[in-house]
Image (cartoon, rainbow, N blue to C red):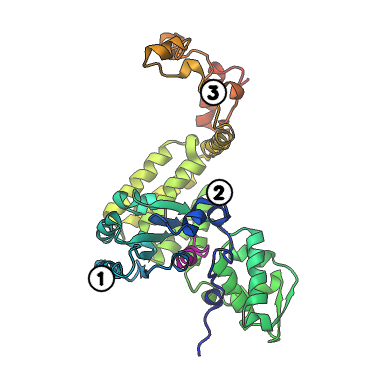
């Protein structure tokens, strides 16, 4: 009998066995409460590979004790979707609760394939659980997405990887027979990259390549050496795809057009979806170039539209032009940093009242209460500016946006200094 892969042997059966995603499955988390009550909405599980999307779907099905159907968007067409929905309709004769339909890599479904799901979701014939590594806002049609709750899954952190490692070497039927000499885990966790499946793949490679069958040594040198010798096995599920896009983005961010073009070529040679690359460039333009060169965002949007229309091989030229433009642009993450600081502060002060002078006053009572009083209409003042407070009282003077040191934002900084002399001082 063929031995199942380690990742399959260790697949959790219950929420209590599940490692990671505590924001979703902790005792007081909304998703866990819904599962334990026996009712879940249509959901999209969005996250990187190897973080437990398929496992979570199977746990939900096991917990709810409903018929469970699985389709892979890679190999299934409209016909498969319709046949599965027909089976689900028949199953409801025996169980009044809607069956669960899990679609892995739902982002690979075409518009027509997603349309074929819509009626069944609307009528409640099925409860849809979709899994995707891509942003569903881009990849799932609006009518279907609007009927789904999106849950974001994250990479496993170091503590969670340590827990998974301990479970593998103590609980697995095969590995528990071996002796593990754990000297260091830095390389193991670094190569895993927060991906549970990667970690378990590496463990299997270490076990299969150990010079002494009963003893498995885990240290940084051994892990690095063995992975370099077994990269094809290590990447058997295509995880290298995510390492290459990471190298590509970091090369552009690091202003090296030559390295960026090399990684771009690696992706194109490997048949990567050109729209996937273009979307990453849009994100990069906003996150890493930002206000240092606002035209970058316009160019990347044009790039996405153009490669979508043309496809390969012409798309390679547009991607090359955009990549070189971004890599050679000045860089700034000030907008990215500013919104994260603002979100953090907004969460901590979610009950802070809107100042009276900024409130709308559509009724007589509101006017009597002082709504809108003392508001200064900027266009009535010199240079279309009037100094006044626009933040809640306790946050007055707070600064989220700090212009970066580049030509474009130096101009912005001078303008801010002329307006907000106390906040942006010379």
Which residue is more in the foreground, 310 or 180? 180
Decide: few, some or many residues near mark 1? Use Cα within 10 Å; few <14, some 14-19, many ≥20: few
Q: Is residue 55 magenta?
A: yes
Question: Mark 1 = which residue?
Answer: 83
Picture quadrant where residue 300 is located = top left
- The residue sitting at 67% across, 76% down in the picture is 170
Q: In terms of secondary structure, where does tag 1 sit?
A: helix
Do we see residue 280 in this rendering?
Answer: yes
Q: Residues within 10 Å of mark 2 (few under 14, many from 20)?
A: some
- Report the span colored magenta: 47-59
Which type of secondary structure does the marked residue at label 2 adopt?
loop
2 vs 1, front mark: 1
User: Residue 326's x, y, as percent?
Assistant: 46, 45
Residue 19 sits above or below residue 168 on the image: above
Q: In this view of the protein, which residue sits in the foreground, 97 or 208? A: 97
Distance of label 2 from label 3 (alpha carbons): 36 Å
**257 drawn magenta:** no
Q: Which mark is residue 391?
A: 3
Residue 319 lies left or right of residue 17; in this view the side is left
Task: Kindly report the distance in space between the C-alpha atoms of the residues bearing marks 2 and 1.
Answer: 50 Å
Give the numbered dot on residue 10. Answer: none
Q: Earlier in the sequence, mark 2 or mark 3?
A: 2
Please give the name of the residue rendered at 52% of the width and 81% of the height, measured from the top-left corner.
4
Q: CA distance from mark 1 to mark 3?
A: 56 Å
**For residue 254, which numbered disc appears in the image?**
2
Q: Earlier in the sequence, mark 2 or mark 1?
A: 1
Circle 2/circle 1 CB separation < 8 Å: no
Which mark is in front, 1 or 3? Answer: 1
Mark 3 element type: loop
In the rendered image, the vertical position of residue 223 relative to residue 42, given as above or below: below
Q: Is residue 82 left or right of residue 74?
A: left
């Amino acid at each position: 009998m063929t031995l199942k892969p380690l990742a399959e042997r260790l697949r959790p059966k219950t929420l209590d066995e599940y490692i990671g995603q505590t924001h979703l499955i902790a005792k007081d988390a909304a998703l866990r409460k819904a599962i334990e009550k026996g009712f879940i909405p249509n959901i999209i599980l969005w996250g990187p590979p190897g973080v437990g999307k398929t496992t979570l779907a199977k746990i939900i099905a096991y917990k709810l004790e409903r018929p469970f159907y699985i389709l892979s968007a890679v190999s299934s067409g409209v016909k498969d979707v319709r046949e599965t929905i027909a089976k689900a309709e028949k199953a409801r004769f025996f169980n009044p609760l809607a069956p669960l339909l899990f679609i892995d890599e739902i982002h690979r479904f075409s518009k027509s394939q997603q349309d074929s799901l819509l009626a069944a979701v609307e009528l409640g014939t099925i409860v849809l659980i979709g899994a995707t590594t891509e942003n569903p806002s881009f990849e799932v049609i609006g009518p279907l997405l609007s009927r789904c709750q999106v849950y974001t899954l994250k990479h496993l952190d170091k503590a969670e990887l340590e827990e998974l490692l301990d479970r593998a070497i103590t609980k697995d039927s095969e590995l528990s027979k071996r002796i593990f000499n754990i000297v260091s885990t830095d390389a193991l966790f670094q190569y895993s990259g927060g991906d549970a499946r990667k970690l378990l793949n590496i463990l299997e490679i270490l076990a299969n390549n150990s010079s002494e069958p009963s003893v498995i040594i885990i240290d940084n040198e051994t892990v690095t050496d063995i992975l370099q010798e077994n990269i094809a096995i290590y990447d058997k599920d295509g995880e290298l795809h995510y390492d290459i896009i990471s190298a590509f983005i970091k090369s552009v961010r690091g202003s090296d057009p030559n390295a960026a073009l090399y990684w771009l070529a690696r992706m194109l040679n490997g048949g990567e979806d050109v729209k996937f690359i273009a979307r990453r460039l849009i994100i990069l333009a906003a996150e890493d170039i930002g206000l240092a060169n606002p035209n970058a965002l316009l160019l990347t949007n044009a790039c996405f539209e153009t490669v979508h229309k043309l496809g390969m091989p012409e798309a390679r030229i547009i991607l090359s032009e955009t990549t070189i433009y971004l890599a050679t642009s000045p860089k700034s993450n000030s907008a990215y940093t500013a919104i994260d600081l603002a979100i953090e502060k907004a969460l901590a002060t979610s009950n802070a009242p809107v100042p009276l002078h900024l409130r709308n006053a559509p009724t007589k009572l509101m006017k009597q209460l002082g709504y809108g009083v003392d508001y200064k209409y900027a266009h009535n003042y010199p240079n279309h500016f009037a100094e006044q407070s626009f933040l809640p009282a306790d946050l007055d003077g707070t600064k989220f946006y700090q212009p970066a040191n580049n030509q474009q934002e130096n101009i912005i900084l001078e303008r801010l200094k002329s307006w907000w002399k106390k906040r942006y001082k010379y």
